[in-house]
Amino acid sequence: MGEEENPQITRRATRLSSSSSSGTPDPKTVESESKPLTINDLAFGNESINLDELMSSLPGRRAQIHKLLRIIGPLNSPISPIFMYGGASVGKTSTILQIFKYLKRPFVYCSCITCYSPRVLFESVLNQLFLHRRRESNGYSSAKRCDKPSDFVNLLREALVKVVEDLKMNVEKSGSKKSAQRTSGRMVYLIFDNLERVREWNKSDILPFLFKLYDVLKMPEVGLIFVSATSPDTYYSDTGFIEPVHVYFPDYTEDDLHQIFTRSQGNSKLYSSFLEAVLRPFCRVTRQVDELSTAFSSLFKIYCEGLDDLGAVPDEHMKNRLYCHLKPHIGPAMNEVFKVLSRPSPEVATNKIKHKVVPMKDGFGESSNEIDFHMSECAKYLLISAFIASRNPATLDASLFDSTGGYSSRKRKRKSSQKSMEQKEIAEQESVMKGPGTFPLERLLAIFQCITSVAEYSTDDEAETGGNNNGLMCDVLLQLSSLCNANFISKGGSCPLEGSLRYRSMVSEDLALKVARNLKFPLSKYLYR
């Protein structure tokens, strides 16, 4: 289940679709939207799930579900703020929404992707608490206009007091007689998803404000839940607030991914044989469900091209035949998914026009730039970054890279004395004798960012993409782990002064230059000679 997939959220679709739907409206939708919202609409609809269904719907998240249920506690239990974090597409959003579907407790959900500014975020929370639906009859306006955090606190407290009173009355009515109650308890929870997007806003005080909201409100009937793709360390500030309870979502294992992809397939045995062929190589570079789903959808069609009956149960002979048919397509599919946009330097582009490389049958020419093993482009840039960090002294990083992240061609030219030339040669010989040096993770990522962030596209590319730099499309830390496992990069001991783990490049200069030529990257310009 992907990170952005919300499982059967009929309530949210009904409340939010009125402002974005187009075309001829569905009569059932119009009828449901014409009815006024009630306190029961703060919870999921009549559909309910038990604990076993909750666990089975979220493979690999049993530990996180148990921890969240323990933190949320029994009915009407005050809770401390919760901070859920983990990489992209690891099931954070799906898990918390499914838990509230199981608990049948009222909550307010806001994503900082669709709520792209403080005002939109504030008004989205207030609209749900005030049971206000934006529609044509009210001009698609919000219940309250709110721009400032101070106004939001006052309006939020007013709305929460009203909701808590309605929930208490709802509990009393349900205790006296049977009613159409869909909510449980008198607690209400505010869920802020994609919290890392708030850092991109111009308002720098919104994040500390959200974290201090629990202290400002001082309402035990309110619970705050933050969902983020980055760790809590990235949100530390000098303003004091109650430390949230952290719940970490690790990447899925291969077994978890196997369960996720096979449970929604008609022929699970056929798809399981397909996963046996593609899942392990893809897991070496990414474990994100959305990226894997995109790649697997096209590969599975190729896998089934030789089948007349898609309901057939494959035997060993059929598995081998289908794998042989699929094998040539796995490598190109991995390159398509994990791609770093980068343009070669103007010198390389000029040389490409002047000197066209003619492929030859004896192994020379263009084929010499091809490497004899598969590696995603992101891993290739990371390999080159590690080689530069091991080869060059750290003091030269500032002179090699300018402020925009590219190579600085404006070097200071000054006359060197004979003595300084000799000292430079001696230092270079000593550096060669010492072998590749070690470097911290921070320096590796800084060099990696420098050589991949400058997207100087050609005129045709700019017209096609609008000059937009999409940046990296894969998990760099996972790529680093794969390179370490393959012994391209080795982990050294921690520095006694810095206390951080250090790395060392294990590739030769010939291999690094070959990878650079494959990427059309001018590596020689970045090496200290």
Image (spheres, rainbow, N blue to C red):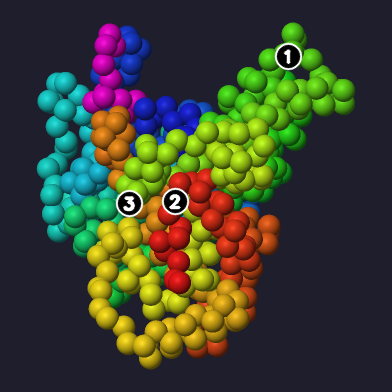
Q: Which residue is mark 3?
A: 454
Q: Position of residue 196 (x, y in %)?
A: 35, 54
Residue 124, position as x, y percentages in the image? 25, 41
What distance separates the C-alpha of mark 1 from that of mark 2?
40 Å
Nearer to me, 378 or 75: 378
Q: Secondary structure at mark 1?
A: loop
The amino acid type found where label 1 is placed reads Gly
Report the Cα–Cα distance between label 1 and label 3.
44 Å
Label 3 sits on what residue type?
Val
Q: Nearer the viewer, mark 2 or mark 3?
A: 2
Q: Residue at x 43, y 54 (%)?
A: 522
| Sequence order check, earlier mark of 2 and 3 | 3
Q: Nearer the viewer, mark 1 or mark 2?
A: 2
Figure quadrant of residue 24: top left
Extreme residue in the front direction: 418
Answer few, some or many: residues within 10 Å of disc 3's Cα (few below 14, many 20 plus, some between 14 and 19): some
Q: What residue sits right under mark 1 in the picture?
A: 306
Mark 2 residue crowding within 10 angstroms, few (<14) / some (14–19) / many (20+) = many
Question: Magenta stretch: residue 168 in it?
Answer: no
Judging from the image, what secondary structure is the residue with disc 2 in?
loop
Instruction: Please identify the residue farthest to the bottom as the structure is shown.
Output: 419
